[in-house]
């Protein structure tokens, strides 16, 4: 079976933007009177905004006060918007892989837990013309690791999730792709992703082709 579409994660997969998020969340931890640990930071990678704030507050031993969490989320969004105001570095091979698959006519979606307001900044680097649709974390009921973002992307493209390959870098995103029924190509970035049935691994996106993506889809069965 040929691949019907490729569903791209954004942070840590196409863009090396996790390092910018790292600055923002570490500064937010200090703003809240705490200190970011590696355990908290790793748990935050790939999380949607709602879960990320819960993880951060829990990790810092803070009360899950809705008003305080709302204010923290607004602070983080302002800071990350500042950090992503200019060109954002690509992950190795990502720009060429995106262009190669696009030139081959393969339908593509951007599927991210990041909010639409920040994703729009990232699309200035990625290029909106590279994607047929995009799905953001604040546009679904439940973000990754729930399957909602990938199910919505497949529905918007008019394809079956099981006919798609999701490209991810994190345990959270990989779990979402699998839960949606996609085949998942994992290119780890900041943290390791445990091997599971249905996951195929690659060290980077350098040299990725449509033919290889089809093999990934077949090999993940």
Image: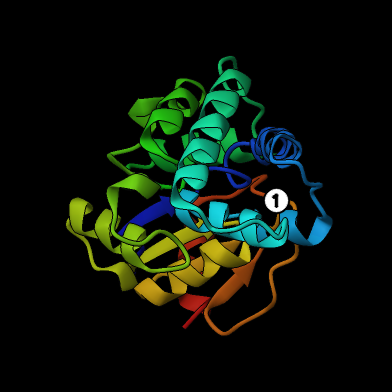
| Near-viewer residue (48 or 6) | 48
* Residue 25 seen by the camera: yes
Question: Does 191 appear above or below 83?
Answer: below
* Residue 183 seen by the camera: no
Q: What residue is at 55 percent from the left and 41 percent from the top?
A: 97
Find disc 1 in the rendering and name its residue.
204
| Near-viewer residue (164 or 13) | 13
Q: What residue is at 34 percent from the left and 46 percent from the top?
A: 138
Q: Would you identify the image quadrant in which residue 154 lies?
A: bottom left
Q: For the N terminus, give its image quadrant.
A: bottom left
- Please, what secondary structure does the residue beneath circle 1 have? loop
**Left-right relation of 98 to 149:** right
Q: What residue is at 43 percent from the left and 62 percent from the top?
A: 165
Q: What residue is at 43 percent from the left and 33 percent from the top?
A: 119
Question: Does 3 appear above or below 97?
Answer: below
Q: How is the image coloured?
A: rainbow
Rendered location of residue 57, percent (x, y): 63, 55
Rendered location of residue 106, percent (x, y): 34, 47
Q: Would you identify the image quadrant in which residue 26 lies?
A: top right
Q: How many marks?
A: 1
Rendered location of residue 140, percent (x, y): 29, 54
Rendered location of residue 27, percent (x, y): 73, 33
């Amino acid at each position: 079976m040929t691949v019907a579409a490729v569903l791209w994660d954004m942070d840590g997969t196409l863009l090396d933007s996790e390092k910018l998020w790292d600055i923002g969340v570490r500064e937010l931890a200090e703003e809240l009177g705490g200190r970011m640990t590696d355990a908290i930071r790793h748990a935050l990678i790939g999380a949607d905004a709602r879960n990320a704030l819960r993880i951060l507050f829990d990790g810092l031993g803070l009360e899950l006060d809705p008003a305080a969490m709302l204010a923290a989320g607004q602070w983080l969004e302002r800071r990350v918007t500042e950090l992503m105001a200019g060109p954002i570095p690509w992950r190795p091979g990502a720009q060429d892989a995106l262009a190669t698959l696009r030139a081959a006519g393969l339908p593509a979606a951007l599927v991210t837990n990041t909010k639409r307001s920040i994703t729009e900044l990232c699309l200035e680097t990625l290029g909106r013309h590279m994607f047929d649709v995009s799905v953001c974390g604040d546009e679904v009921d439940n973000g990754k690791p729930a399957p909602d973002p990938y199910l919505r992307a497949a529905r918007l493209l008019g394809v079956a999730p099981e006919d798609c390959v999701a490209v991810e870098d994190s345990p959270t995103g990989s779990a979402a792709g699998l839960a949606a029924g996609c085949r998942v190509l994992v290119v780890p970035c900041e943290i390791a992703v445990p091997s599971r049935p249905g996951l195929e691994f690659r060290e980077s996106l350098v040299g990725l082709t449509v033919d290889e993506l089809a093999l990934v889809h077949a090999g993940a069965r």
